[in-house]
Image: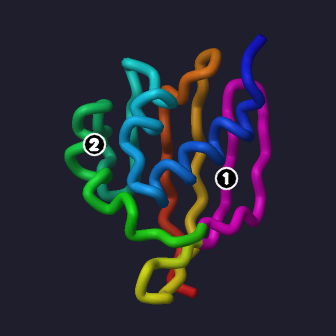
């Protein structure tokens, strides 16, 4: 039986906030693909860790505004607080195959 995908999604945010790469490695599928306005052509798993992971540990809190599971996707809108106290809001569409996250589409929000 597959684990609750909403909980899997939240676990990914917790791993990012903690800078826990081992936990994140266990959550992502081998064919993981990351897309954002800055990465329109997409990043594979290795590219994600090279480009995005250096920011891990810089967020002290993710406050989930909405988390919606729809089939193999979880849509997450969150407000994040950085270590310096500044805040921002993003929405992400996370794709899953079984218990592994295989995609992330990030839509940058705004500073709060």
The image's mark for residue 49 is 2
Residue 67 vertical placement versus 32 (above, below): below
Question: What is the distance, in whole Å, between disc 1 and disc 2 at their CAs?
Answer: 20 Å
Q: Residues within 10 Å of mark 2 (few under 14, many from 20)?
A: some
Q: Give how far across and how far down residue 107 sits, in percent.
A: 51, 58
Which residue is situated farthest in the top direction here?
1
Of circles 1 and 2, the one toward us is: 2
- Mark 1 and mark 2 lie on one chain; the one further toward the N terminus is 2
Question: Residue 60's mark?
Answer: none
Residue 97 locus on image (x, y percent): 59, 18
Asked where in the image residue 9 lies, by quadrant, the reply is top right
Q: Residue 16, position in %: x, y? A: 45, 53
Residue at position x 76%, y 51% in the image = 67
> Does 76 appear in magenta?
yes
Q: Nearer the viewer, residue 47 or 21?
A: 21
* In the image: residue 9, left or right of residue 7: left
Q: Which mark is residue 76?
A: 1
Q: Around disc 1, counting alpha carbons within 10 Å, would you say few (fewer than 14), some (14 to 19), or many (20 or more)?
A: many
SS for dot 2? helix
Residue depicted at x 32% and y 62%: 55
Relative height, residue 40 to residue 57 (above, below):
above
Residue interval drawn in magenta:
62-79
Of residues 69 and 2, the one nearer the viewer is 2
Image location of residue 53, percent across then percent down: 31, 51
From the image, give the main secondary structure of the stretch colored magenta. Answer: strand
Q: Residue at x 67, y 33 (%)?
A: 73
């Amino acid at each position: 039986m597959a684990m609750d995908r909403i909980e899997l999604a939240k676990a990914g945010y917790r791993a990012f906030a903690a800078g826990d790469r081992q936990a994140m490695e266990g959550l992502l599928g081998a064919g993981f693909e990351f897309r954002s306005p800055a990465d329109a052509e997409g990043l594979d798993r290795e590219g994600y860790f090279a480009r995005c992971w250096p920011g891990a540990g810089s967020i002290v809190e993710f406050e989930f505004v909405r988390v919606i599971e729809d089939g193999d996707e979880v849509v997450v809108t969150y407000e994040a607080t950085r270590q310096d106290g500044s805040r921002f809001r993003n929405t992400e569409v996370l794709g899953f195959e079984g218990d592994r996250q295989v995609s992330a589409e990030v839509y940058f929000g705004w500073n709060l």
